[in-house]
Amino acid sequence: MLKQDCERKAFKRLAEKIKESYPRLPICILDDSLYACAPIIQICEENKWG
């Protein structure tokens, strides 16, 4: 379980850096079921990422 928590936290940090560096870049996220959770989906929706 700790590995999943670390990867999810890393996604949040990475998403912030990507949005800051490329604010207008259209992005489509393709991941496995590890990232299919409400917090990750919410980040993608807030950033208008598919």
Image: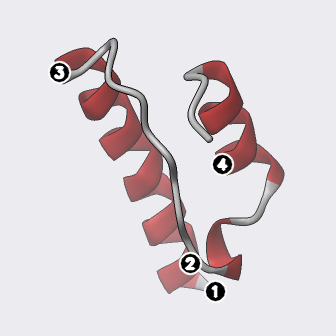
Which numbered dot is residue 1? 1
Mark 4: few/some/many CA within 10 Å (<14, 14-19, 20+): some
Quadrant of the rendering where the N terminus is positioned: bottom right
Name the residue carrying label 4.
40
Q: Does dot 4 land on a helix, a strand or a loop?
A: helix
Q: In which quarter of the image is the C terminus?
A: top right
**Of marks 2 and 4, the one in the foreground:** 4
- Marks 2 and 1: CB-CB under 8 Å? yes
Residue occupying image coordinates x 56% and y 78%? 4
Front residue of 42 and 22: 22
Toward the viewer: 17 or 26?
26
Residue 7 shown left or right of residue 38 in the figure: left
Task: Determine the image quadrant of residue 2.
Answer: bottom right
First of labels 1, 3 by sequence position:
1
The disc at residue 4 is 2
Counting residues from the start of the chain, the first of labels 4 and 3 encountered is 3
Amino acid on which disc 1 is placed? Met
